[in-house]
């Protein structure tokens, strides 16, 4: 059964069919959550809260874009709220640029530092720029699929990728 | 090269194994089974209201439209007459469709072409990178005419005007001006999208080429368009059919769908060019005429740098005037100190020679130059140079003199007033009535916030219990909310409000209402009354009666509340739609400030009231800021927002942290624009009630050999 059909039946009351969707999109949605927030615990919370919100708003879903895209949007929105609530705490974790100096770090930990820098650079992007990067580079979706998911023209996806990469290039200059 | 490296780096990151925890799916399914989907009564009601609103608006628009059309037909006949040509529709051209698939932006297609012109060729150049492309549309006309080329790309970094070219500013009637930001490349922050640039290339007074550059209007899809006809390299003159400026403008009109016209020279106001103002000398030695104008805009540390070079020549000699802006003072120049007489500027206004770079004269052989800097809103640097032996120091000084004095300096918070140290994990400050009384927020060491008053730090009670909201000051008293989340979902979380008196360090703890599960922002309505906005309306707490009372029952979907400083209004972001609404706590009247697009993943990131409670600024995640004033919304661009939206007390100045410093946005000529970016090295900032600025600096070792954050207080100069 296609996602749209399952959702339609869920909307008509067969909410137990949602179980199939949870399992079907478990990996994709979790990875997306992980790329958004950068740690496993928050990603797990975000995953579950995304599904709760999806259930809560299922009646609003219109089969316009991909269902997974709709889930991604909910996750991104919810993450932003999550971030808002905790930004006071996160700001202390926000590193000063001078603290991270890959030049002085031993070879065996460079990979971890790289990951940290990439994650920080990703987090600094606004959602409209971050989501295409995650979907294109990490999830391997084609531009037109991303456009479909985000319900924007393909050109907009391309331009957002362009802008996002431009910012990432600047932020990740030390690694390039 | 870099492009490949970034792609490689991102792909490498993708390869990191990311697997969901075991049983995440089944746990989530159990969770979903334990809840039931709610009913959307309020949303439905709201949709109906929206529907009524749309119908009413549509009726009104139709009436306005009909009236405008009638008025235009009756009273106004446009003076413009279209050049010979005809409408075209290129959207279904197979090659256009093919290139559109590959282009990262929506192709700008002219809907009009001069008579006899047809699309000859469409090419896409992606040699730089797959996204950084340029698309060329070439149009050919009848025999004997020159082709017209339309280039569309993201980047426009430099243009050189040579041989008696004079640039003209072109107004593109997009309506609301958009100030280009650093993401837009090329001209960058401070240049408006509704201004284009047009010039004619001439040889012996004959027009050899026309060039018009402008940007498209879609912020998500902004690109630069260059319309060019003819070439200085062509042997023949541009034929008459295409030499008319009107033809180039008409093509631009058909692309933008709006009016495009040359701004008459006398109307070119400073506002159009203020960040790229080319200062023309009012004195140039006899026989020298301008032969070259070069404009360059480049990005440095995410900020655009504008520079220009004017060349004045005779048959044998030349004088070059370079001018550029910088955020940092330039290095001192070698040479003799030079006095520039600022009492006789061409425009009498403020002028201050930068102490970092005094005017200097330097000569080596025939080469001579004068360098000087005007310290205004940023540093304006000049270099006047020549290799003409016939010109002396006095002549060069006269030219330099004629370039000075054309800037004003806007005060900025840059005068260091005071300095002190706070705990090394401090990440925010909240000031009381003066700078000797503040709260520093610390997330560590079992003390999450400290009050500093009378030269000592005091722990604030209750904060260790859980999450807490910002404090609200009223004189010596502060109030804040603490919410401790119980790890056991079956047990209720604890909600307490603390009223702390900094004059005697006494405090009272007030239990919150059980249903309040989120952090609320309490305020003092008066000495004895607290108020909060919760999901079911406004609650007040009378400190003498010692009880909460729901004074304004109103069902709202509260996500975050922002009380105005005078507590006469409370703005809140709604949970579902993320609308921004202002509520009158007395009457319950709601005013929708910003209605979010329900299908958009965007949201409101931060909200701040002006100190006089009359204006509301907020930041949208799509790098867009707004100011709500007198029930009107005005936009401003956000450059790399990293947090802490605020208002300078008593001023029409908005502040926020960006990636390179502290961005300040102010109202000038009725518009909100970036005016200054203070490139402080700092961690966070806070405004003091007296208007001074506190910056929490980086970690240092203080006099007591302790690691601490340095806090600097700056006043305005």
Image (cartoon, grey):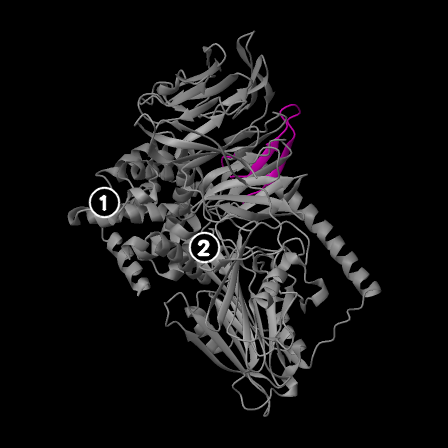
Q: Residue B351 at what x, y percent from top left?
A: 61, 51
Assess disc 2: are there few (<14), some (14-19) or many (≥20) residues with their C-alpha within 10 Å of its C-alpha: some
Q: Disc 2 on helix, strand or loop? A: loop
- Report the Cα–Cα distance between label 2 and label 1: 57 Å
What is the number of the mark on residue B19?
1
Considering every residue shown, the one lying at the far bottom of the view is B143
* Residue found 54% across the figure and 59% down from its top: B218
Looking at the image, residue B296 sits to the left or right of residue A52; the answer is right
Q: Which chain hosts label 1?
A: B
According to the image, label 2 marks what residue?
A: B332
Q: Is residue A164 left or right of residue B91?
A: left
Residue B338 higher or lower than B696, as above or below: below
Q: Position of residue B402 (x, y in %)?
A: 63, 62
Q: Quadrant of the C terminus of chain B?
A: top right
Secondary structure category for the residue under label 1: loop
Query: What span is in magenta?
Result: B574-596
- Give the answer, above or below, for where A105 lies relative to B479: below
């Amino acid at each position: 059964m296609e996602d749209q059909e399952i959702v339609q039946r869920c909307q008509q009351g067969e909410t137990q069919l949602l179980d199939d969707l949870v399992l079907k999109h478990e990996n994709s949605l979790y990875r997306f959550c992980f790329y958004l927030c950068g740690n496993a615990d928050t990603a797990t919370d975000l995953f579950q809260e995304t599904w709760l919100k999806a259930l809560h708003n299922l009646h609003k879903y219109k089969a316009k874009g991909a269902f997974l895209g709709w889930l991604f949007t909910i996750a991104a929105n919810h993450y932003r709220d999550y971030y808002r609530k905790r930004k006071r705490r996160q700001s202390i974790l926000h590193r000063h640029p001078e603290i991270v100096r890959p030049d002085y770090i031993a070879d065996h930990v460079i990979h971890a530092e790289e990951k940290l820098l990439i994650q920080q650079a990703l987090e600094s992007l606004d959602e409209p720029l971050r989501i295409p990067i995650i979907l294109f580079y990490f999830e391997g979706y084609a531009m037109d699929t991303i456009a479909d998911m985000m319900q924007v023209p393909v050109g907009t996806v391309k331009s957002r990728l362009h802008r996002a990469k431009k910012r990432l290039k600047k932020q990740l200059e030390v690694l390039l | 090269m870099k492009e490949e490296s970034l792609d490689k780096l991102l792909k490498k990151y993708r390869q990191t194994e990311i697997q969901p925890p075991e049983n995440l799916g089944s746990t989530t399914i159990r969770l979903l089974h334990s809840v039931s989907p709610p009913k959307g009564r309020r949303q439905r009601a709201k949709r109906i209201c929206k529907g009524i609103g749309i119908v009413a608006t549509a009726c009104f628009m139709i009436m306005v439209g009909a009236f405008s059309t009638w008025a235009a037909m009756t009273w106004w006949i446009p003076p413009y007459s279209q050049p010979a040509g005809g409408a075209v529709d290129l959207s279904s051209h197979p090659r256009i469709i093919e290139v559109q698939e590959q282009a990262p932006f929506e192709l700008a297609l002219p809907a009009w072409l001069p008579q006899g012109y047809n699309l000859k060729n469409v090419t896409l150049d992606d040699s730089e990178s797959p996204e950084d492309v340029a698309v060329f549309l070439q149009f050919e006309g009848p025999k004997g005419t020159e082709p017209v080329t339309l280039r569309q790309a993201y980047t426009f970094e430099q243009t050189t005007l040579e041989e008696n070219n004079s640039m003209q500013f072109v107004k593109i009637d997009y309506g609301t001006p958009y100030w280009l930001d650093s993401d837009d490349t090329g001209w960058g922050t401070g240049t408006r999208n509704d201004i284009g640039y047009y010039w004619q290339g001439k040889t012996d007074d004959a027009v050899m080429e026309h060039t018009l550059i402008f940007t498209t209007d879609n912020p998500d899809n902004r690109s630069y368009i260059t319309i060019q006809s003819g070439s200085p390299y062509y042997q023949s003159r541009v034929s008459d059919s295409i030499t008319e400026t009107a033809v180039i403008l008409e093509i631009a009109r058909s692309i933008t769908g709006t009016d495009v016209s040359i701004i008459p020279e006398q109307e070119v106001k400073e506002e159009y060019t203020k960040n790229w103002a080319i200062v023309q000398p009012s004195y140039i030695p006899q026989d020298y005429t301008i032969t070259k104008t070069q404009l360059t805009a480049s990005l440095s540390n995410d900020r655009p740098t504008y520079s220009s070079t004017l060349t004045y020549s005779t048959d044998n000699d030349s004088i070059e005037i370079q001018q550029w802006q910088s955020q940092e003072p330039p290095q001192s120049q070698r040479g003799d100190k030079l006095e520039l007489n600022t009492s006789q500027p061409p425009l009498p206004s403020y002028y201050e020679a930068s102490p970092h770079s005094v005017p200097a004269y330097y000569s080596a052989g025939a080469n001579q130059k004068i360098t000087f800097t005007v310290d205004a809103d940023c540093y304006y640097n000049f270099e006047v140079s020549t290799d003409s032996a016939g010109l002396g120091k006095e002549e060069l000084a006269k030219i330099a003199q004629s370039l000075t004095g054309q800037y004003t300096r806007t005060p900025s918070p840059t005068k260091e007033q005071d300095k002190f140290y706070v705990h090394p994990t401090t990440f925010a400050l909240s000031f009381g009535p003066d700078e000797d009384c503040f709260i520093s927020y610390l997330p560590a060491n079992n003390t999450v916030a400290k009050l500093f008053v009378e030269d000592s730090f005091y722990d604030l009670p209750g904060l260790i219990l859980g999450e807490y909201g910002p404090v609200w000051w009223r004189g010596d008293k502060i109030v804040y909310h603490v919410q401790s989340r119980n790890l056991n979902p079956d047990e209720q979380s604890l909600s307490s409000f603390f009223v702390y008196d900094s004059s005697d360090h006494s405090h009272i703890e007030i239990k919150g209402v059980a249903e309040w599960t989120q952090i609320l922002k309490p305020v003092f309505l008066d000495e004895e009354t607290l108020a909060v906005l919760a999901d079911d309306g406004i609650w007040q707490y009378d400190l003498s009666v010692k009880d909460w009372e729901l004074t304004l029952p109103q069902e709202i979907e509260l996500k975050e509340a922002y009380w105005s400083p005078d507590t006469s209004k409370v703005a809140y972001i709604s949970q579902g739609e993320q609308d921004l609404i202002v509520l009158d706590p007395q009457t319950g009247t709601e005013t929708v400030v910003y209605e979010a697009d329900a299908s958009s993943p965007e949201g409101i990131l931060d909200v701040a009231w002006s100190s006089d409670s009359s204006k509301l600024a907020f930041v949208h995640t799509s790098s867009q800021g707004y100011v709500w004033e007198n029930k009107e919304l005005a936009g401003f661009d956000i450059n790399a927002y990293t947090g802490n939206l605020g208002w300078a007390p008593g001023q029409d100045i908005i502040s926020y942290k960006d990636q390179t410093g502290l961005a300040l946005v102010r109202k000038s000529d009725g518009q909100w624009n970036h005016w200054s970016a203070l490139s402080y090295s700092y961690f966070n900032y806070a405004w003091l009630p007296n208007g001074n600025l506190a910056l929490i600096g980086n970690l240092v070792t203080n006099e007591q050999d302790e690691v601490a954050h340095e806090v600097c207080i700056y006043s305005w100069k």
